[in-house]
Amino acid sequence: MAQDLKKMFNDDRELKTGKMPEGHEARFLKKLEKELPAQSINKRFSVWSIAASVVILFGLSFGAYRFFEKPIENITPDEQVVTLKSLGDVSPDLKKVEDYYVANINLELASVKLTSENKELFDSYIVRLEELNNEYKRLSIELTESGPNELTVSALIDNLKLRLNLLYRLKEQLNELNTSDNHQSTT
């Protein structure tokens, strides 16, 4: 059974004429198609893959929109986006002053106990605080447009002082209201 492979290959080469039998390639392609059919376009692009692509596209678009979106702090009449300057943009010391007043204003507002008896008084003070807040925004626009000057900076600080003093007065009046209610209820 053992045969010399070298001799077999040499003999085989001598027998070959170098021509392929007639129809050999067609038969080979037919058998190949039978064993490995070509994938149809319908299978590759199914409805689910198209839907998944659309969902991914919308997700990426929304993510890009949110990533590149800039916050709008102020819209001028020309519809241009302008970033308002604050006291902190003028100097670090003025930022400390602004932070001090804003923190105290928020602290005083948080400490007010709203009841049905003091709601009317509280609402009147809130209206006044909103007016001062709108004035502060107007002054910030002026600071942004014309740059820092002594009058604008002092007006911004005075506005913060007024708001804080207004809240102190509100607390005093609420305390007086509570003491008078307590006094009336004990008698």
Image (cartoon, helix red, strand yellow):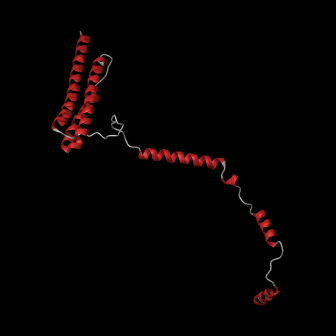
Q: Nearer the viewer, residue 19 or 73?
A: 19
Most extreme residue toward the top is: 187
Q: Quadrant of the N terminus?
A: bottom right
Q: Residue at x 56, y 45 (%)?
A: 55
Most extreme residue toward the front is: 78
Q: Residue at x 29, y 23 (%)?
A: 127
Q: Quadrant of the C terminus?
A: top left
Can you give x and y, in whole percent of width and height, for residue 166 in the image?
Answer: 22, 25
Left-right relation of 9 to 167 = right
Q: Residue at x 30, y 17 (%)?
A: 120
Can you give x and y, in whole percent of width and height, for residue 103 in the image?
Answer: 25, 35
Q: Nearer the viewer, residue 123 or 72?
A: 72
Where residue 104 sits, quadrant-wise, is top left
Most extreme residue toward the right is: 22
Name above or below for residue 18 compared with residue 38.
Answer: below
Q: Residue at x 77, y 63 (%)?
A: 33
Where residue 165 sits, quadrant-wise, is top left
Count of marks, rendered view: 0
Left-right relation of 72 to 125 = right
Can you give x and y, in whole percent of width and height, for residue 49 in the image?
Answer: 62, 50
Can you give x and y, in whole percent of width and height, for residue 77 in the image?
Answer: 34, 34
Most extreme residue toward the left is: 150
Q: Nearer the viewer, residue 71 or 180?
A: 71
Where residue 180 sits, quadrant-wise, is top left
Q: Nearer the viewer, residue 8 or 152?
A: 152
